[in-house]
Image (spheres, rainbow, N blue to C red):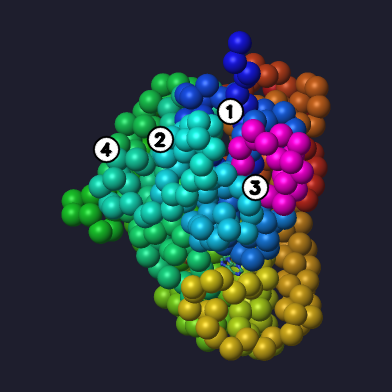
Amino acid sequence: MAAEKTFYLETFGCQMNVVDSERIVDSLKQIGYRQVSLVEDAGLILLNTCSVRDKAERKVYGHLGSFKPLKADNPALIIGVGGCVAQQEGERLLEKLPFLDLVFGTHNVHKLPEMVQAVEKNRVRCLETDFLDRETRLALFPRRTEGDMVSRFVTVMQGCDNFCSYCVVPHVRGREISRPSAEILAEIEELSAGGVREVTLIGQNVNSYGARIEGELSFAALLAAVQAIDGIERIRFTTSHPRDLSGELIAAFATLDKLCLHIHLPVQCGSDRVLKLMNRGYTRAGYLDRVRRLKEVAPEIRLTSDIIVGFPGETEEDFAATLDLVAEVRYADVFTFLYSPRPGTAAAELSDDLPAAVRQERFDRLLALQESIGRQVWAADVGAVLPVLVEGESRQGEGQIFGRTTWNRIVNFPGSPELIGRTVPVRILRSNKNTQLGEIVI
Ligand code: 5AD
Ligand code: SF4
């Protein structure tokens, strides 16, 4: 009997990679592989990687290095890298890591089974990092309708044309393309028929969905069409570029009752001078005006954001403007990042003499401010009874289930797995740093 084929897959980075990993799992199963959760049990080890920040990239090299001894013990082991680091580094990965067998870029996930089989058969080393043309990309758009999950990501667009000066995404994911709305809606209908109750429409900048296609729905119109699909109870989307947040989309928070009251609207910085250097295409006042209009149409809405600290040449005054904006918006959550230069980006060419200690000190100040605001925002829920869509059994232990509130916060509470897929009223008893504890109200 032939030995069983097993693979271990680890995913880093954004939702795009999560969706690509789902496709990797499916396609490897089709060629007879079974997924395992321990790297030691695997005959094939894959990392789906992220290169958006230097730290993410370094992690990949460190991680791959740790597989080297496994290969020494088992020469038949196959080791591969996909995602943004694979796209960016390509051949260099194979040169630097002699034990690595295959490298597949962001447009080449569909080639993986073929590559794995080529390594199995001939022990060749494979590299596929070509960008594909529009038609081929559209035909290969990730879609998935099987599975028994309550909440799913649906990819509506891929790539990014914004070229924010610090960002590697347009370089490693390629140009922006939107998927035809008819296909998106058909997928969501199928998902709904299979028991999915919540969809999150994803793309690097969903707000520019359809903008370049004659006759295509706007993103707000796409959301309205999803709202009309029976069985779907909740709609979310991510990520939004503030510049492209239209009045029509803002209004959707009032008119579409399935649209959850949360928007991730990365501001990156509160200083006009730095926003310009970042090539973000909006001003502080323009951003704050959008926030005001969002809160006007949907007073309960909660915002989250991404902020980069220590962009080249950031002054104390620039940074103070960021702190001030954070205090004004009162975000529910902020993902704070230390700036790191990325290969091939415009910002990497800027002179940068900000001492690391100054960057770190600013980072810590921002974190402390946001922690105190976030604590207050989430503490306000204690005592409230909120609708929670139950997603699964909780990692908190036996008899515990979990779901999310409209604000995308996970709530753990005692309950039967039979409730999975249902929306139940839950009284919030405690707000921890990232999750809440509650009890069902009968
Ligand atoms: N350095 C630091 N943070 C970055 N991000 C993107 N590129 C960089 C970089 N070079 C952050 C942005 C973006 C998030 C996904 O990662 O805040 O919104
Ligand atoms: Fe990067 Fe800007 Fe595109 Fe977001 S919008 S992926 S930050 S280039």
Q: Which residue is mark 1?
A: 423
Up-down: is 100 above or below 38? below
The answer for how far apart the CA atoms under marks 2 and 4 are is 13 Å
User: Which residue is pictured at 25% across the width and 59% down the height?
Assistant: 212
Q: Which residue is mark 2?
A: 143
Callout 2 crowding tier (Cα within 10 Å): few <14, some 14–19, many ≥20: some
Up-down: is 143 above or below 241? above
Q: What's the residue type where badge 1 is placed?
A: Thr
Q: Which residue is mark 4?
A: 182
| Position of residue 106 measured from the top left corner of the image (x, y, whole percent) | 46, 50
User: Which residue is pictured at 77% across the width and 43% down the height?
Assistant: 69
Residue depth check, mark 2 versus mark 1: number of the one nearer the observer: 2
Label of residue 53 in the image = none
Residue depth check, mark 2 versus mark 4: number of the one nearer the observer: 2
Q: What's the residue type where badge 3 is placed?
A: Phe
| Position of residue 235 measured from the top left corner of the image (x, y, whole percent) | 47, 40
The answer for how far apart the CA atoms under marks 2 and 1 are is 26 Å
Do callouts 2 and 4 mark residues in contact (Cβ within 8 Å)?
A: no
* Extreme residue in the top direction: 1
Quadrant of image for the N terminus: top right
Residue range highlighted in magenta: 64-79
Type of secondary structure dominating the magenta stretch: helix
Does dot 1 land on a helix, a strand or a loop? strand
| Position of residue 416 measured from the top left corner of the image (x, y, whole percent) | 71, 18
Among the two numbered marks 2 and 1 on one chain, the one whose residue lies closer to the N terminus: 2
Residue at mark 1: C-beta within 8 A of ligand 1: no
Label of residue 99 in the image = 3
Of the four image quadrants, the one with ligand 1 is: bottom right
| Position of residue 115 measured from the top left corner of the image (x, y, whole percent) | 47, 38
Among the two numbered marks 2 and 3 on one chain, the one whose residue lies closer to the N terminus: 3
Q: What's the residue type where badge 4 is placed?
A: Ala
